[in-house]
Amino acid sequence: IKKIAVLTSGGDAPGMNACIRAVSLAAIGAGAEVIGYKYGYNGLLKQEYIHLDPYAVRNLLQRGGTVLHSARCEKFKQTDQLHIAAQHLNDAGVDGLVVVGGDGSFKGAERLQSIWDKPIVGVPGTIDNDVAGTDYTVGYHTAIQTAVESLDKVRDTAEAFERIFVVDVMGREAGFIALNSAISAGADHVLLPETFTTAAEELVKILDKLDKRRKNRANKSHIIVVTENLWPGGLNVLADSLQAESGVDVRILTLGHVQRGGSPVWQDRLLATKLGTYAVEIIKQGQKGMMSAINHRLPAAVPLNDVSIERKELNSYSMQIRDEISLLG
Ligand code: ADP
């Protein structure tokens, strides 16, 4: 291999920079040149890239965000645009492409692979952890850490005023961030897309738990973690119902995009370094349409095709203890 290209696409995540660095250093170590396309697939369509040498990637391991920028690119879904991208890769003399992104970006990578004859490898970079075939995704641990720190702070103010706080965390269609940040911060209730039934049923469950906990303990504060976009009509609807039924002050906190920022925690740095390095290994082996993954703690090349079909499960033991533990607290 003479030249490898890398790009970051879709929802940004802490540790994407660490991926760029790992891919670059591994490729340079193998004697290849490296280019980085900017703004996700947009850079590929516009032939807009920068050269990545060891100097360009210095200090990227610890930096949040992505120096290549991330973006969505609707145009890339058109087949004629995929052909333009393939032509641009050939024009630039690229022998292998690494796409750091989530499952949406992987669909694009899979389609591009069907018309381009050199290897494309996906590196799972998303805070949501919703990519099957890999134990974890880059950015996930940092997002949990950010959510946990925020929940700890909310707990202080909730206790001071004996309020109920409804906290919205990210996760797209998956409850990984919600479940694990809720347990790690000792939240009292968590609402997950994997188990959500109806607003009416969920409200009964919340009120029931609230009631039990209020009988058990002196402080009347209560923290409820909710996965984004889950409650029908939005969290105002939930907050109004809760306030009306319980008579306790309810406040809403939306953590939002802070969860995508910040210096990556060590787990994400390590994961990014392993996955980026292994992505170059997969390209060197000439394997096409793969995701560089850590599967049961070992590096693995997983077909992108399998990734898009499978749904990743939440940890069953975390699910089991989430209710038991919060009722006692
Ligand atoms: P994520 O990668 O974080 O899941 P998105 O779902 O927004 O983010 O996808 C990121 C980008 O991947 C899209 O803007 C588009 O450029 C590309 N993409 C997604 N689905 C497809 C598809 N079916 N065909 C081609 N490109 C796609």
Image: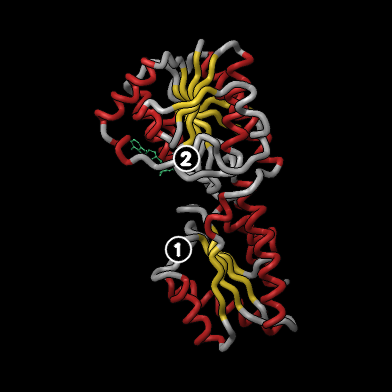
**Which mark is on residue 230?**
1
**Residue for point 67% across, 53% down:** 145
Left or right: 237 in relation to 217:
left
x and y percentages locating residue 69 in the rendered image: 49, 39
Local packing at callout 1 (Cα closer than 10 Å; few below 14, some 14-19, many 20+) is some
Q: Name above or below for residue 284 compared with residue 232.
A: above
Left or right: 118 in relation to 278:
left
Query: Label 1 amino acid?
Result: Leu
Left or right: 322 in relation to 128:
right
Between marks 1 and 2, how big is the CA–CA gap? 26 Å
**Which mark is on residue 187?**
none
Going by the picture, which residue comes out furthest to the right? 218
Q: Name above or below for residue 286 compared with residue 191.
A: above
x and y percentages locating residue 265 in the rendered image: 69, 44
Q: Is mark 1 within 8 Å of ligand 1?
A: no
Task: Tell me where residue 135 sits by quadrant.
Answer: top right
Local packing at callout 2 (Cα closer than 10 Å; few below 14, some 14-19, many 20+) is many
Of the two numbered discs 1 and 2 in the rendering, the one whose residue sits closer to the viewer: 2
Q: Which quarter is ligand 1 in?
A: top left
Q: Name above or below for residue 89 compared with residue 110.
A: above
**Residue for point 54% across, 72% down:** 252
Q: Name above or below for residue 123 compared with residue 170.
A: above
Do the residues under discs 1 and 2 have CB atoms within 8 angstroms?
A: no
Going by the picture, which residue comes out furthest to the bottom? 247
Circle 2 SS class: loop
Residue 290 can be seen, yes or no: no
x and y percentages locating residue 173 in the rendered image: 45, 53
Frontmost residue, 110 versus 27: 27
Query: Label 2 amino acid?
Result: Ser
The residue pinned by badge 2 equals: 70
Q: Earlier in the sequence, mark 1 or mark 2?
A: 2
Count of all numbered marks drawn on residues in the image = 2
